[in-house]
Image: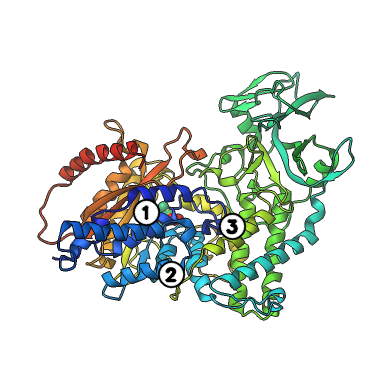
Amino acid sequence: MTYKKKLIEVALPLDAINAESAREKSIRHGHPSALHLWWSRKPLATARAVLFASLVDDPSAHPEDFPTEEAQERERQRLFHLIEKLIIWENSTDKELFAQAYEEIKKSTGDNPPPVFDPFAGGGTIPLEAQRLGLKAIAADLNPVAVIINKAMIEIPVKFQNKSPVNPVAKSLLDAEWHGTRGLADDIAYYGKLLKEKAYADIGHFYPKVTIPGIGQKAVVIAWKWARTVMCPNPACRCEMPLVNSFWLSKKAGKEAYLEPMMENDKIRFEVRYGKGKVREGTVARTGATCIACGASIPLSYIRNEAKKGCMSAQLIAIVAESQGGRLYLAANEEHKKIADMPLPEDVPVGDLPEKALGFRVQEYGITKYSQLFTKRQLMALTTFSDRLIDIREQVCADGGTKGYSEAIVTYLAFLVDQLANHGSVICGWNSPNQQLRNTFARQAIPMVWDFAESNPFCRSSGSFHSLYGRMCEAFQSFMPSGQIGMVYNASATADLNVGSVVLSTDPPYYDNIGYADLSDFFYIWLRRNLKEIYPEIFSTMLVPKKEELVATPYRFAGSQQAAKEFFEQGMFDVCQNIYRYATQDIPLTIYYAFKQTDMDVGGTTSSGWETMLSAIIQAGFSINGTWPIRTEKPGRSVSIGTNALASSIVLVCRKRPADAPICTRRDFLTALKRELRPALVNLQQSNI
Ligand SMILES: C[S@@+](CC[C@H](N)C(=O)[O-])C[C@H]1O[C@@H](n2cnc3c(N)ncnc32)[C@H](O)[C@@H]1O
């Protein structure tokens, strides 16, 4: 079978792609990922370069135009130069540049580029970039949260592009131009502000300012710091002992602050100290806890039992406020303790945590329902914002928006409720080095957090509605919807979606690394409450469907590693068979596969993830024509510390194997791969690629 070689099968400007991909991970403002969190998103720059280079012919495929190697190399360099410009973040909405890229793609695809399909679309990176390149994008994911994110990325913005906003302020602007997503973004900004005002009118009084002692002035609270407590088992003590991981409040040079515990009438209270004093060790660690009052050592098993009996409480230990001179740390006071002690709001979303799941630790401490991941005040805020979404829908229609448009606006605002949940749960910690709240998913896990920080959604600091909403509005600046509305399916990649002949580019789940379905229930319970009327099919189940999720977790198979492995292997094989059915002959497909440090270790560690993926690809009838190591993950994330976190991805470039291809055994192939992959990766890592 003859086909034209594509650029990705010959060469890539890898240094530039890696550098831009790494840089993109630090971009805080204007990135589409600000719409909604998803785990292990790939950089847009990587997806953009991979798609372009998969579609554009390598100059060697046109000897009539480029007869010599020099001529081919010159042409390749021209294409490299174009890729190097395309991947620069600041060029993401450069229409002329992307029109030029589209012309190149058309030239290599007989003026009729096929659609791009990603069956594991997740946070929507690949479909979004396909659309940016002017291609029809088809996204699918089993997970309803991912499906909604993809709709918000490739469907809604195209449907409502180039439309004037309906809000009354925008209507009064006579000369305004509403290209692309500007109108939609303007309405989200307007109705987002209205949502906050409505919620504040309902519950703002539950977030009082704090009086600065000695000065008498009032300051806006950023966060309340709480510590879990259990009763000390020492019969002579019996104090309610606070479990504090760290007494530091600020480690910022010159602004150090910490808490000093004080005993008072058998009770422990905390005073704030500024400067570099002698800060006590935390009272709880992995090995156990210590009672501040009597010094007794307490095993974690005791704390687990107390917590499961419902005997774990929380004590307010400090208040963090905003001041002109920076963060202000104040001791807890009665007013602020009392106001947080409110009745449980009605109509909180129901849902049980899985008995066991990857990275979930809280169940051992009696937290078995999603609603227990929030304080009563956090639940009140989330339910209030959720309830007010109904008013917003009505208001958009009253202002002249169609029903469909009001639903689109509410979809994005429901994402803001999710963002508030991410920044407002009992899993949020206080990061003393940078004096900021740490969000729930600082790691891909739900760990037990002993001293958690409860943010004030109505302040203006990170984690507040104001800052999250600001980031969401900015995210639209990086959208460049094309003429074709993206298609989004809620389906398993193991099912035949009958998508026709497409270019396949995808990033499948990596073996047992991330339990997407379990993690995303944290958001699903809120999205379902807020959007099930709009998307009844997507939110038809109480929780995210888990059965078909491709993850090799023994928790789903009564603890059996073997059963989990077999399920993953069979699933990946079924997926690759489907992919074989959809893939066009003349364009290679690209599969991103995560690469962990242990994948490189010789002897000892086997890499089930890689073995499974490679054997599924080959058994389905593909050949692997190229492998490109790409730095897709941000180095130094908190999950990577001491864990086998994802370091990078290898992009596998595959083609349907010709019927007359030479044969080698799977074992021979894997041996050759193991032999060649490791030195290649070492070389690339040494060159900082
Ligand atoms: C590595 S993530 C994709 C990330 C995405 N490329 C991005 O940049 O955001 C893998 C995705 O596969 C999805 N998934 C897992 N099992 C699936 C199945 N059986 N069918 C379809 N999607 C599945 C997960 O929900 C997850 O979103």
Q: Judge by depth and name the residue closer to the eye, 299 or 64.
A: 64
- Circle 3 or circle 1, nearest the eye: 1
**Where residue 347 appears, x then y in whole percent?**
69, 59
Would you say 36 lies left or right of 122 here? right
Give the residue type that dot 3 points to: Ile
- Above or below 368: residue 590: below
Give the residue type that dot 1 points to: Pro
At a point 55% along the width and 63% down the height, the residue shown is 477
Q: Residues within 10 Å of mark 1 (few under 14, many from 20)?
A: many
Instruction: Tell me the SS state at disc 1.
Output: loop
Q: Is residue 327 visible?
A: yes
Disc number for residue 367: none
Q: Residues within 10 Å of mark 2 (few under 14, many from 20)?
A: few
**Where residue 497 appears, x then y in whole percent?**
35, 69
At a point 21% along the width and 40% down the height, the residue shown is 676
Viewport quadrant of the N terminus: bottom left
* Residue pointed to by mark 2: 96
* Whole-number angstrom distance, CA of label 3 to CA of label 1: 25 Å
Q: Quadrant of residue 368?
A: top right
Would you say 565 lies left or right of 149 here? left
Q: Judge by depth and name the residue closer to the eye, 474 or 1.
A: 474
Q: Quadrant of residue 63?
A: bottom left
At a point 85% along the width and 24% down the height, the residue shown is 265
Q: Judge by depth and name the residue closer to the eye, 376 or 588.
A: 588
* Residue pointed to by mark 1: 508
Give the residue type that dot 2 points to: Glu
Instruction: Tell me the SS state at disc 3.
Output: helix
